[in-house]
Image (cartoon, coloured by chain):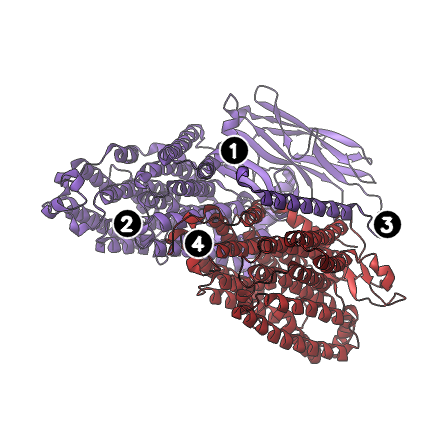
Chain colours: A purple, B red
Amino acid sequence: MFKQLTNQTKRFWSAALLALLATFLLAAGAFAAGVPGAEKAAAVAAPAGKLHVSPEKGAGRLELRSVGEGVYKGNFVITNQGTGPLKVVRVVARTSAQDPRLPKGVSVRWAGKAVSLAPQQSQTVQVTWSSAATRAQQLFGHVLVESDALAADGTPGRAAAIGIHAEKFSGPLAWLWSHILSIMVFLPLLGVVGMFVAHLMGYRDDKKLRLGVLGLMGANLALAAGLYLKFDSSFIKVHGNDGYQFMERAVWVRSLNIEYFIGIDGISVSMVLLTALISFVGVLCSWSINKQMKGYFAMYCLLVTGMMGTFVALDLLLFFVFWEVMLLPMYFLIGIWGGPRRQYAAIKFFIYTLSGSVFMLLCFIFFYLNGDPTYLVDGQAAAHSLAIPELSRMAWATKGLTILGISAVKLVWVWLFIGFAIKIPMFPFHTWLPDAHVEAPTAISVILAGVLLKMGTYGIMRINMTILPEATQWAAPAMAVFGTIGILYGAFCAMAQKDLKKLVAYSSVSHMGFTLLALGSLTPMGIEACIVQMFNHGLITSMLFTLVGVVYDRVHTRDLDKFGGLASEMPLYTSFMGFAFMASLGLPGLSGFWGEAMTFIGAFPRYRVLTIIAATGVIVTAAYHLWALQRMFLGKFREEWRKSDYLKDFGGKFPEINKRELASVAPLAVLVLVLGFYPRPLLNLIDAGAAELHRMIDKPGPTQIAQLDERPALPELAQNKSADQTKARAKQETAR
Amino acid sequence: MQTLSMLASAAVGAPQGAQALSNLGSLEYYGPEMGLIAAVLLIVAADLIVKEHRTKVLSVAGIALAALAYSGGSSLNFLLSGVEPQLLFGGLEGGGTGLIVFDDFTHVFRVLFAVVSGLIVLFVVPGMLDEGASTGERHNPGEMLMLLMVLTLGMNMMAASCNLLMIYLSIETVSVISFVMAGFKIGDRKSSEGALKYVIYGGVASGVMLYGMSWIYGLTHSFDLGEISVALSAMQAKSGTFPEAAFIGVACMLVGFGYKVSAAPFHMWTPDVYEGAPTPVTAFLSVGPKAAGMAVLIRFFADGLDASSASDAPWTVVLGCMAMATMTVGNLSALNQENVKRMLAYSSIAHAGYMLLGFCVFTQTGITAIVFYVVAYCFMNLGAFLIVMAIAETNGGDESMAAFRGLGRRAVVPAAVMTVFLVSLAGIPPLAGFVGKFYIFSALLESGGSWNWVLAVVGVLNSVVSLFYYARVIRAMYLEDATAGSEVITVRRIFGVTSFALAIPTLVLGVYWAPVYDFVARSLSRLH
């Protein structure tokens, strides 16, 4: 490109460069010039001890190294950096019987009594993790150092801490396992970069790029499969690390105590797997996109990053960023590659979601500002935090905070819930969904129904329920009621639809109603049912949308009344459609059945009437599915199709579902069938997570009623303290 | 809770009990401004001496950039090396109260103004280089850049003044130059109309402000902000309430300040002026003087009124209402604009509202949030205006929404960069605008109380509304097909490069903003 430069422009650029150079020189001169009156009197302070804790080598958190036999060791140094003596009272791991933060087997070698350090004197402490007896593959935690050092304002300081970290993953893939979630989140971003580079280089062979994206999503799917095999489904809170696996944790923005904190547990693992699967299927469904393919796949990849990130993020701000990252690609994907009313649908989706999420942001700031002190991953004391496990330890309900005169926990719960309910979408916030689905291209409908909707329910479980269990109990009946309304309303609306895609969209509203009813029950079975339903709905609806796309690609209409007798034209397609419909209406033996059945079992003990009403929804569901099936596939084939322009190339016959389309539907169908007969693999994955979540909500235990004092109590103290707490709680009860 | 009265002794305020330096002794601390003054003179000289057009342009631009680099660089140096604050210009002998404060607050704003003005120089110079290309704009390069230097000087003074007269003088300096710059397109009706409106509005606003100042002077017998604050609190202690007369005086002054930051209901001039003025000038007006207005507002309320959310004078409510009105009016009016430049004008009104939100809590975090917001806003807003300018240049000055149709295919990179700016303006992560809003809202919620929650809720609702009109441009660029022609558009390379360079901080500040925020926070909170 430099060849094109004329002499004139060359002169201009050289002059501009010279000017720039002069500018920098002058700025540097201003820097170097003496500053008037820069001398300052050194502050004279009373001699005092100042505690400094750091790893023996390097800085930041203490990395424990393997010394063989599953034992990990590391040393850190306590130094008195002050001018006076310092008394270190004790050094302990930050964990306790009631609130096990660490995996078992962590020991800190400390004399057990107070040690006095003169200025500049230091003492080395050894931390050992004998990991043989634990399930944990990782160790994330803190060692506390209590001393008589004062805080900056002269009050007794908090215990200092140092973060400890170890990874048990070994073998050639150790690095992969300890970073697998980050890889899965950011691998698709490679696609975005690739598309941009391809554009800049003027690469024209878009079909190869498409294969590249397929490969990327395939790699992600393979990683997900690995994750499934490696995931320890019975790992829960008592095993340490707050029950999370494959964690990664680092400080992101120190001044705001924001961490890059990701990990999965029994609640999110199924969603991560689902995302990987559906995003792979989505690429296969995108084959009919031929307009601006680079832009399409760049947006698609960004969308996948956003979704994946939302399911693994454990820091609220990180969660929020991923949540919002997915908005803009979705807007473009619907708006550019969508149907006739795409602009309207795209902006409606955008505005709806954003209006929910801005309130979410306010809630997150509320959590941040009112939270209790904790420590960042490297041990720095933090007055506030946005880490979900930390926030879920705090006793929000007993803080007595109010917003605008309303009980804060309730208002925050409702705001968060609305943000998530828009995404689910819950009646009455569902109106964006049919529009978005009808206008979106097939693959995006698949993603939308298969994954995006689940983000709402997942958010409720991860944030509403874990952080605000008391408010969840308060609001559970409302959730159940709205869920039931959604089930019926969605089903009746679906029945009235002529557009097949709109029918499936409304069936989504109906099916997602089950998740809310299940969550509202707050029983272990209910919570499990919710996740099962989310997963299965993801599979089945993706299948349905893919199949709708198949017929739409052929004749560019989805009007049920225009079809009829397709069974004779496309028998294989019809059988798949019939299969998907049966799964969707909850036929026993197919996976859709489990979500609904478990919902009813879970919800019945608590909401008898609602459950019975919801169960009638199943009849309506069966009705609209069968009716649609009948209108489209049974009866007499309409002969006017033979003359249709669309079918001219195929000799007036509907072409059968092709191999690529089959490839996108078949894996889903197999899963639906397998999980229908043998749901154990899925349930195994979820069981422990659901039970754990239930434990948090149902009986806010010692980890819920937070110990405001961070120091883990000595055994005898602990007993007194818990007795004190019980008394205090009793007192509060009576006061109420 | 840290209140601004604490701040008065920390960042914003003059050193307690310190005596001002003598006029001559002050000059040592007046380097940044003297550099600008020298640049003004040098530019005039260069304009007279150099004959060849291209050389002339480059030399005056060089002088301007050098002076700005000196002003910004030395202020940055003051910040980094932690110079003791001083009161300047206390008469021939020194002592007394002084006219100008030399402190970290001033330095931060000086650095900011230098960056903004420097970017504007980059905006205007390419247009000057090709003679007779653009329509009806003046071609004498010295004129524009000299005015820009004077304007920057005025803004520096606005941030530094601690005396009502100095405040008035510096605001007038900025205003008068702005009038001239707004009318820079000779023979262009819109430009002239805008400039005239600007003059009339400015005249009335400064008249009312001066009237308010005379009330304050009458009550307190002083122009100095520190003395005013002492006198007012003495009066308040005597009568138990904030004196009504002073309230009226301050309310009148708010008219002047509000006009400067284009806060509702004193914003009426903004759209016309912004639409009529040459785009670089618009970009400048939407960032520079606005930030300077915020600086004056903060200085006056912190030092002159010792305002805090705890005081019984209803400043929180008055300013909160102003902020809400500003956001809402700006956003709602922007919804239906067909001219992108005019839309951005309304959007800048809305952003003034967000900044005011951070202001009306009167806390340290609020002020830090404002300054950070201004930094983020400077990049994204200048960037958006630059793209408008670059696109308008390629199609004969068409700035309407129609000119943006199909841009996603016709000019891929500018459209992508514009999307980044607009999404950032809408406050969506992971971009700088989101972080700015995040800090503003957390400052509000940190202070707590129902009123602040109401403000925060109105604020977030407003940002939803704002998405709507920013998305209209994005929609035009990507979702709609070009109405006229579909050939590829190439923007001037320097504009392409500059806008890309502005997009980088917009992105980076959204993902890793800690260094910048920490720097701002540290600078504003250093105790002396």
Disc 4 vs disc 3: Cβ atoms closer than 8 Å?
no
Q: Is residue B146 visible?
A: yes
The chain identifier of the residue carrying mark 1 reads: A
Are circles 1 and 2 on residues that touch, CB within 8 Å? Answer: no
Q: Is residue B475 left or right of residue A659?
A: right
Secondary-structure class at tag 4: helix
Quadrant of the image occupied by residue A530: top left
Q: Please report, as a chain letter, where disc 2 is located.
A: A
Amino acid type, residue under disc 3 in the picture:
Ala
The residue lying at 48 percent from left, 54 percent from top is B394
- Same chain shared by disc 4 and disc 3: no
SS at badge 3: loop
Instruction: Say whether disc 2 or disc 3 marks the residue closer to the N-terminus.
Output: 3
Q: Nearer the viewer, mark 1 or mark 2?
A: 2
Residue under numbered circle 3 = A41
Are the residues under marks 2 and 3 on the same chain? Answer: yes
Q: Quadrant of residue A535?
A: top left
In the rendered image, which residue does mark 4 sit on?
Answer: B474
- Kind of residue at disc 1: His
> Badge 4: few (under 14), some or many (20 or more) residues near its Cα, within 10 Å?
many
What separation in Å lies between label 3 and label 1 (alpha carbons)?
54 Å
Mark whose residue sits in front, 3 or 1: 3
For disc 3, the neighbor class at 10 Å (few under 14, some 14 to 19, many from 20) is: few
Front residue (pair B53, B244): B53
B359 or A26, which is in the foreground? A26
What's the CA distance linking mark 4 and mark 1?
49 Å
Where is residue A529? Give x, y as percent: 35, 43
Vertical comparison of A318 with A435: above or below: above
Q: Which residue is mark 2?
A: A507
Q: CA distance from mark 4 to mark 3?
A: 56 Å
Q: CA distance from mark 2 to mark 3?
A: 74 Å
Disc 1 designates what residue?
A: A239
